[in-house]
Structures are given as structure tokens and as C-alpha cells.
Amino acid sequence: MGPRPGTAPEEDYSRTRLPRPKDLEQFCVVTKLMGTNQVKVYCEDGVERQLRIPGKLKKRVWLRENDIIIARMWDFQPEKGDVVWRYLGNQVAWLKRNGKLDKLPI
């Protein structure tokens, strides 16, 4: 049985995760895959960094060049950090539409 007449179908609603500046997180674009769970990224503050893919994301999240991600910088070595989140295509479109990715060269 389908939905009752006169009722609107439920929309697929999900929240898009945004970086938390107090946790040293920011948007980045993957520029190069370096192997051994390392990637080079260009961050929204204009700095190119080397990031590590942590163990909980290794097999679950596969990165490609030009992917938009959230990176958490290390407080003791700010030119390096960890990958926190990878955005999917529809999430990237939403971020562009709402002006969140204006500082990135994409």
C-alpha cells in the first residue's frame, strides 16, 4: 500500500557536518594521494598540508583527488593533521550553494 491520498511524502532529511574551528577543523581539497594512508591537501586558509587517514576511516572511507574533506590540524604540528570527514556529491553541492566553500579553489 502506498501513502494515503492528501499526505505529502516524507523528505529525506540529513544534516551536513561542518568543521568546528575550536577543534582546529577546516575544509580542505585533496590534491594528491601519497599512499600509506597519507594525503596532500589544500586547506581553506591557503596552506598545503599532509594529512593522515586514521584507522577508523582507513577501509571505510576511500578518498580521491579533488574530494572535499574536513581536516583536524594537530595542535603541536599545524602543518599536519588527520582526515575527519569526506563529503559526498550532493553534500558538496549544498556547501557550494550556501557559500561555505568560497575560500577553496574548486
Image: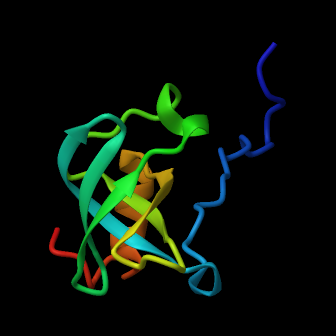
Q: Position of residue 36 (x, y in %)?
A: 32, 34
22 over 15 or under it: above or below: below
| Visible residue check, residue 21 | yes
Task: Give percent across and percent down for residue 94.
Answer: 42, 64
Whether residue 8 sits left or right of residue 106 in the image: it is: right
Instruction: Kindly identify the residue that appears in the image at 20 percent across and 52 percent down.
Output: 66
Q: Extreme top residue here?
A: 1
Residue 65 in view here: no
Q: Quadrant of residue 24?
A: bottom right
Establish if 104 lies above or below 59. Answer: below
Looking at the image, which residue is at 81% across and 12% down? 1
For the point 60% across and 63% down, the residue is 17
Q: Identify the image quadrant of the C terminus.
A: bottom left
| Pick the front one: 77 or 72 | 77
Residue 12 sits in quarter: top right
| Extreme residue toward the front, this view | 76
Identify the image's colour scheme: rainbow, by chain, secondary structure or one colour. rainbow
Q: How many marks?
A: 0
Q: Residue 100 location in percent, x, y?
A: 40, 79
Give the quadrant of residue 57.
Answer: top right
What residue sits 51% from the left and 72% below the top? 74
Instruction: Say which of 81 and 61 sits in front.
Output: 81
Q: Nearer the viewer, residue 45 or 95?
A: 45
Residue 68 in the image: x percent, y percent?
33, 58
Of the pair 31 and 17, the residue shown nearer to us: 31
